[in-house]
């Protein structure tokens, strides 16, 4: 199935997308992960994107659209995929819809994780990532066995520069002002499902997996 996960930062989009990949084999395409990879490598996209990312602002539409469509074209996207963190503006959504229609692989389902402010702040301030493999943890909710060390690869954990209170505020404003409109956009298309992002990851996953078709 081809699906999009929408939600404020910290809603659990990445966590659920990884679960869908690990348990059902659905290809996971995360704009944030791809951008961070490009920053780490010092690639041209990373150089253009990093100042926006550090401030919590959106990277310009044309850069992310090109990057994500390239990724879709070069992956086994006809077997299905989950887009995590993309689209984030109506312009991105429309451009992607046109391109995916041409490729005959339109989006079939959009899931919105409605999440309270309290959850968002707690999750983002406690989020930790692995420097080596990018695995995602939380110091309280999803701790590693050994503090500061990745369970999957033994890599060192770090806190994202943009997971600080000031930048979280900017990202939330952008979500409310630019990304939330996507909910109506997809509702009008009849492919929107809403669920609570506040619940335990396993509970959210169960509901999600219940509506995701695998082929
Ligand atoms: P979160 O998981 O907290 O929602 P992401 O990892 O998805 O954050 O994104 C991190 C940053 O990458 C964003 O703050 C933004 O600067 C950039 N970014 C990610 N996705 C997009 C997008 N679709 N359009 C523009 N910028 C994006
Ligand atoms: P997003 O991709 O939407 O920004 P993440 O998947 O990165 O969100 O989750 C944000 C943080 O919250 C991470 O540290 C993650 O381990 C933790 N987390 C994700 N989903 C849940 C959940 N359902 N319950 C508790 N903690 C969660
Ligand atoms: Zn790791």
Image: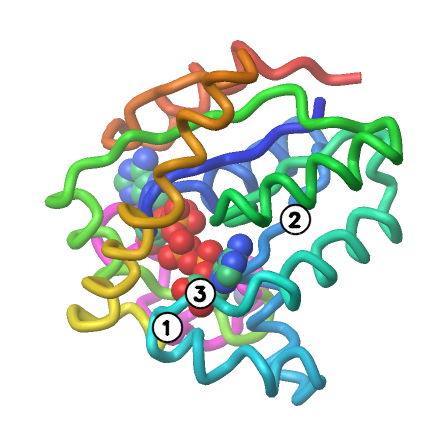
Distance CA(mark 1)–CA(mark 3): 16 Å
Looking at the image, is mark 1 or mark 2 earlier in the sequence? Answer: 2
The residue singled out by tag 1 in the image is: 160
| Disc 2 versus disc 3: nearer the observer | 3
Q: Is mark 3 within 8 Å of ligand 1?
A: yes
Residue that appears at 52% across and 74% down: 155
* Residue 153 position within the rendered picture, expressed as x and y whole percent measured from the top left: 58, 65
Left or right: 170 as drawn, with respect to 192: left
In the rendered view, would you say 196 is above or below 115?
A: above
The residue singled out by tag 3 in the image is: 58
Q: Which mark is residue 29?
A: 2
In front of the other: 95 or 157: 95
* Residue 94 position within the rendered picture, expressed as x and y whole percent measured from the top left: 63, 40
Is residue 66 visible in the rendered image? The answer is yes
| Disc 1 versus disc 3: nearer the observer | 3
- Per the rendered image, the range of residues in magenta is 134-159
**Labels 1 & 3 near each other (Cβ < 8 A):** no
């Amino acid at each position: 199935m081809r699906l999009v996960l929408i939600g404020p930062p910290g809603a659990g989009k990445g966590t659920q997308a990884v679960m869908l990949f690990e348990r059902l084999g659905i290809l996971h395409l995360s704009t944030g992960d791809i951008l961070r990879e490009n920053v780490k490598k010092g690639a041209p996209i990373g150089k253009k994107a990093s100042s926006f990312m550090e401030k919590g602002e959106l990277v310009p539409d044309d850069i992310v659209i090109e990057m994500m469509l390239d990724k879709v074209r070069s992956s086994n996207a006809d077997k299905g995929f989950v887009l995590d963190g993309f689209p984030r503006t109506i312009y991105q959504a429309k451009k992607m819809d046109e391109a995916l229609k041409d490729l005959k692989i339109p989006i079939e389902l959009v899931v919105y994780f409605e999440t309270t402010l309290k959850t968002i702040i707690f999750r983002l301030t406690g989020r930790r990532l692995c420097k080596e493999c990018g695995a995602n943890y939380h110091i309280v909710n999803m701790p590693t066995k050994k503090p500061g060390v990745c369970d999957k690869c033994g890599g060192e954990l770090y806190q994202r520069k943009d997971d600080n209170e000031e930048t979280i505020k900017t990202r939330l404003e952008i979500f409310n002002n630019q990304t939330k409109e996507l909910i109506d956009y997809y509702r009008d298309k009849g492919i929107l499902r809403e669920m609570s992002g506040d619940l335990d990851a396993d509970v959210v996953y169960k509901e999600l997996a219940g509506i995701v078709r695998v082929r």
